[in-house]
Image: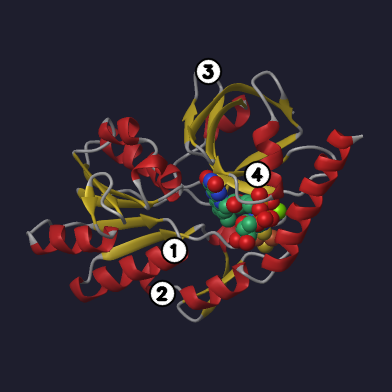
Amino acid sequence: MAKIITKRRLNPTVTLMEVSAPLIAKKALPGQFIILRVDEKGERIPLTIADYDREKGTITIIFQKVGLTTELLDTLEEGDDILDFVGPLGRPTELEGVKKVAVIGGGVGCAIAYPQAKYLHEHGVAVDVIAGFRSKDIVILEEEFQAACDHLYLTTDDGSYGEKGLVTDKLKALIEAGNQYDVVIAIGPIIMMKFVCKTTEPYGIKTLVSLNPIMIDGTGMCGGCRVSVGGQMKFACVDGPDFDGHQVDFDELMARNAAYKEREAQVRRDHACRLLNQEVQ
Ligand code: FAD
Ligand code: FES
Ligand code: MG
């Protein structure tokens, strides 16, 4: 059991929870994740360790409500317990020996990119962050990123905040302006990561992406999270979730992640109907 210490809504669909998990907080590093189960009937879902406080013994998770489990998680309040909370899982991001880095987050992917930016900034690395959102009303973590980088560039698709345009436009402009990045770290929608990799490839800039295939056990046993990297099969939960983006088969990942879309939508609709019926009775 892990107690929710604080709960904060970051935008209409994204919630931050600080959770008491001293053993995980002791070991956690940027790039790692936890797997949780809300209650005894619940499925297991992976969420990135967005932050950790070793002294307080807490882990921060930031999640977007996209389906049944994230909606159920969002019904929990401060003082409530999450039944299972397991981690830290996955390999930490390899961040040694770099001097200048661009960290790119797309939407809720910013929550996953934040710990890398913070860690690098704390360790004296020059960090430029490009955070992209659809529009102003869903911008998250602006203040946190300001404190965790040298330059923060905010972009929105519709121009309602920051610069109008895509993160890839901004990245290309920064590279063309002479910024020499040792590594680009890109985390967000699969399509965004794919196009960041296409942007950096001609310049030969190493690009790390954090992959988000469907995970079940998180220990390399079930094979659910398999991805193709450099023509080889890898399990994102134990070999990743970070990989060399120039080697990733993004189209296969997109197809595999969409495999249960209809079923996921059905389960969400059924649950909403059950809640509605309970209210009527
Ligand atoms: P559903 O309706 O069941 O599914 C919606 C979509 O979520 C699916 O189409 C699929 O793409 C994805 N998904 C569903 N089940 C799983 C699963 N078991 N494993 C992985 N993806 C799944 N999201 C965040 O909002 N914040 C995070 O910090 C975050 N970190 C992640 C870290 C890793 C390593 C991975 C693999 C995924 C991460 N995700 C994160 C995605 C998150 O796990 C899914 O959004 C969540 O599982 C959706 O569950 P659901 O029941 O609410 O939605
Ligand atoms: Fe089962 Fe990775 S989630 S092997
Ligand atoms: Mg689900």
Q: Residue 132 in the image: state x and y as whole percent.
A: 33, 51
Q: Residue at x 66, y 24 (%)?
A: 77
- In space, the residues marked 4 and 2 are separated at their CA atoms by 31 Å
| Disc 4 residue lies near ligand 1 with CB under 8 A | yes
Q: Can residue 150 be seen in this view?
A: yes
Residue type marked 3: Lys
Q: Residue 56 carries which label?
A: 3
Residue 144 vs residue 185, the one in the foreground: 144
Q: For mark 1, give the secondary structure.
A: strand
Q: Residue 95 in the image: state x and y as whole percent.
A: 34, 49
Q: Quadrant of residue 239?
A: bottom right
Q: For mark 2, give the secondary structure.
A: helix
- In space, the residues marked 2 and 1 are separated at their CA atoms by 8 Å
Residue beneath label 4, please? 70
Mark closest to the chain's N terminus, 1 or 4? 4
- In space, the residues marked 3 and 1 are separated at their CA atoms by 31 Å
Residue 5 lies, with reference to residue 146, above or below; the image says above
Residue 105 lies, with reference to residue 277, above or below; the image says below
Counting labels gives 4
Quadrant where the N terminus lies? top right
Residue lying at the far right of the rendered structure: 281
Residue type marked 1: Phe
Q: Residue at x 68, y 18 (%)?
A: 79
- In space, the residues marked 1 and 4 are separated at their CA atoms by 26 Å
Q: Is residue 36 visible?
A: no
Residue beneath label 1, please? 243
- In space, the residues marked 3 and 2 are separated at their CA atoms by 39 Å
Callout 2–callout 1 Cβ contact below 8 Å: yes
Position of residue 254 in the picture relative to residue 39 (left or right):
left
Task: Judge the density around disc 1: few (<14), some (14-19), many (≥20) Cα neighbours within 10 Å.
Answer: many
Quadrant where the C terminus lies? top right
